[in-house]
Image (spheres, coloured by chain):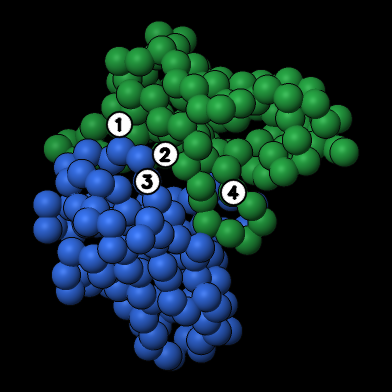
Amino acid sequence: DTEVTQTPKHLVMGMTNKKSLKCEQHMGHRAMYWYKQKAKKPPELMFVYSYEKLSINESVPSRFSPECPNSSLLNLHLHALQPEDSALYLCASSPRAGAIDTQYFGPGTRLTVL
Amino acid sequence: KQEVTQIPAALSVPEGENLVLNCSFTDSAIYNLQWFRQDPGKGLTSLLLIQSSQREQTSGRLNASLDKSSGRSTLYIAASQPGDSATYLCAVIVNSGGYQKVTFGTGTKLQVIP
């Protein structure tokens, strides 16, 4: 299995909803990432999970909350989002912990906040 | 702060032509540089990774070079095909304060005309 899977593919939510995005990889990779990509912009790194620790980009609002239940699964919990949070959310993984080598990306979740 | 720029922003070429995409970065203390392609609304596919100690990497019709001293990387695509049409992104990874940061370039949208 050489792919990163993300669910759901599309998500529409209101500003008062709570939802979660799921990312899974079965390649035995030791690092996983969440990116946010606005239309016609490059991806921006939100969170890194490596060495069984989460590194947080301090510019990411607290309404985004990552969770790593095990080494192959990375969730992103969403709460009280704003319309400007609408974007493509990409998950990626790489083989080694502590060093960002070749990243394998999932297909993304298209999020729309109403 | 690392800034990564890609020129040109868009490129249209006839099938069969050889082409060069450029990536410039401001902080030369990089860990590695990666090239990706992204099809519309999709995730990213890794093309090539160049470690900071390397000068170039090749995969099939693709060749990527790295010149850290001048803060530049190029992606050479030989004998372009319509299937190469996509947005190409470079990503620069640097070590910062005990963890790594990823900065994506602005992207080059390539169209190969049959």
Secondary element at tag 3: loop
Which amino acid, mark 4? Gln
User: Local crowd at mark 4 within 10 Å, few (<14), some, or many (≥20)?
Assistant: some
Pair 3/1: label in front: 3
Query: Is residue B15 placed above or below B99 in the rendered structure?
Result: above
- List the residue tagged with mark 4: B38
Residue A57 horizontal side relative to residue B46, left or right: left
**Upstream in the sequence, badge 2 or badge 4?**
4
- Label 1 marks a residue whose chain is B
Q: Which chain is blue?
A: A
CA distance separating discs 1 and 2:
8 Å
| Residue A55 shows up from this direction | no
User: Local crowd at mark 3 within 10 Å, few (<14), some, or many (≥20)?
Assistant: many
Residue A44 percent location from the top left of the image: 44, 51
When asked about the image quadrant of residue A92, the answer is: bottom left
- List the residue tagged with mark 3: A103
User: Local crowd at mark 1 within 10 Å, few (<14), some, or many (≥20)?
Assistant: many
CA distance separating discs 4 and 1:
22 Å
Q: Let me know if marks 4 and 3 both belong to one chain.
A: no
Secondary element at tag 4: strand
Pair 2/3: label in front: 3
Q: Are marks 1 and 2 in contact (CB under 8 Å)?
A: yes
Q: Which chain is green?
A: B
- List the residue tagged with mark 2: B103
Which amino acid, mark 1? Val
Q: Nearer the viewer, residue A53 or A24?
A: A24
